[in-house]
Amino acid sequence: MATAATVWGGAAAAAAAGPASALLWHRDLAGEAAGLAVAPEAVGQAALQRLTDFEAAIARYCAHPFRRASGAETVVARSGAARLLSYGEGERAALVVPSLVNRYHVCDLSGRRSFARWLAARGWRVLLVDWGSPGERERGFDCTGYIRNILEPFACEAARLSERPQVVIGYCMGGLLALATVLRASLPFAGLALLAVPWDFHGGGGPEARRLAFAGTAFAEMLAGSGEMPVDALQTCFYALDPMLTPRKFLAFGALEPGSEAERAFVELEDWVNDGVPLAAPVARECFAGWYGRNEPVRGEWHIDGEPVRPEAAALPALVVVPAGDRIVPPASALALARALPDATVRRPRLGHIGLMASKTAPRRVWRPLLAWMNGLP
């Protein structure tokens, strides 16, 4: 709300300062400048109307009756704050690894919109990692700690429950952890699917990555005493990538028909977006300073248990899904990982970072091709 007030209020103030024609314009923009002859009062009224509509949309969202049902998942393993959730009873297992900074709900938003349930209904046992919120033990973990103490034991449990080698599916940051686990574990894996997974953190977005590195590292160091980086600090870092995203999406939400399916779908996803998870301080330093700052993964300098993570050593089929409209993981960043893998198939659906899991067209554009690839593995 403060950002929207500053931007829209600034437009009103600039309009009141004088007509657009009085400003210095580049000659190539002269035609556009001539069309900006708007009364200052009109600009002020439009700014006020947008702020009013934005506030009303937030109130409407908060008052929506949807509440995600929880507690019905089958838990097959636990490790500290983390749980391994099971969907379906298929003979083959798919271990799904989401990001550490968001809850697993993105893979299971509701009974009507759930990647995990969709895949389970088509013959696979889906084992979804719920990282939980860092407890006293997890606050001391870096990525090595999460892999060694949680992800590797969960992969062993998946192997026990699967009659054939399991498939590992990593989403966003979870894909980096999944890749490292596959490279380290002494288990047979049938394939590795990587959905919107960054690798070259300066590819396609170097300045943005460096801003994230600066902000994230500053927060991580400032908050190290608590052992974790709170959700609000994480949100602030990524908010800087597109400060007007929230006003735009809530204005669009306010225009939806009350009681519609689109309204409910927005609330389901927005609840997930706003229900983040704190990040253990050692992981925060590793990610912001090491990944976004020094770009360690693509340079071969990201280490797990002292060993570099080298995708070129992955001796198994891989599917790399690179959403064409991803603004969180620029396509160039994810494509760098596809090039490093020796046996990678690449798909580039016309979706965004979250859309590949939560949009109406995700089943057609992502889930079905992923399932076909999985069914074709030995």
Image (cartoon, rainbow, N blue to C red):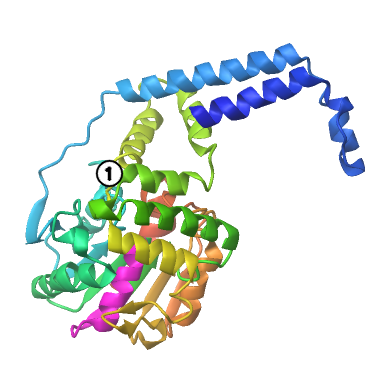
| Residue topped by disc 1 | 109
* Residue 123 placement: quadrant: bottom left
* Residue 55 placement: quadrant: top left
Q: In the drawing, does residue 9 fall left or right of residue 263?
A: right
Q: Residue at x 15, y 58 (%)?
A: 82
Q: Is residue 109 above or below residue 164?
A: above
Q: How many marks?
A: 1
Q: Residue at x 13, y 72 (%)?
A: 153
Q: In the drawing, does residue 130 fall left or right of residue 9?
A: left
Q: Nearer the viewer, residue 273 or 201?
A: 201
Q: Residue at x 47, y 75 (%)?
A: 338
Mark 1 surroundings: few (<14), some (14-19) or many (≥20) residues within 10 A: many
Q: Position of residue 308 (x, y in %)?
A: 36, 83
Span shown in magenta? 173-191
Q: Is residue 28 above or below residue 216?
A: above
Q: Is residue 185 visible?
A: yes
Tell me the kind of residue under disc 1: Leu
Q: Main secondary structure of the magenta part?
A: helix
Q: In the drawing, does residue 221 fall left or right of residue 5?
A: left
**Looking at the figure, which quarter contains the C terminus?**
bottom left
Q: Is residue 342 magenta?
A: no
Q: Nearer the viewer, residue 208 or 293?
A: 293
Q: Residue at x 82, y 20 (%)?
A: 18
* Residue 161 placement: quadrant: bottom left
Q: Nearer the viewer, residue 257 or 41?
A: 41
Secondary element at image label 1: loop
Q: Position of residue 244 (x, y in %)?
A: 55, 36
Q: Is residue 360 above or below residue 196?
A: above
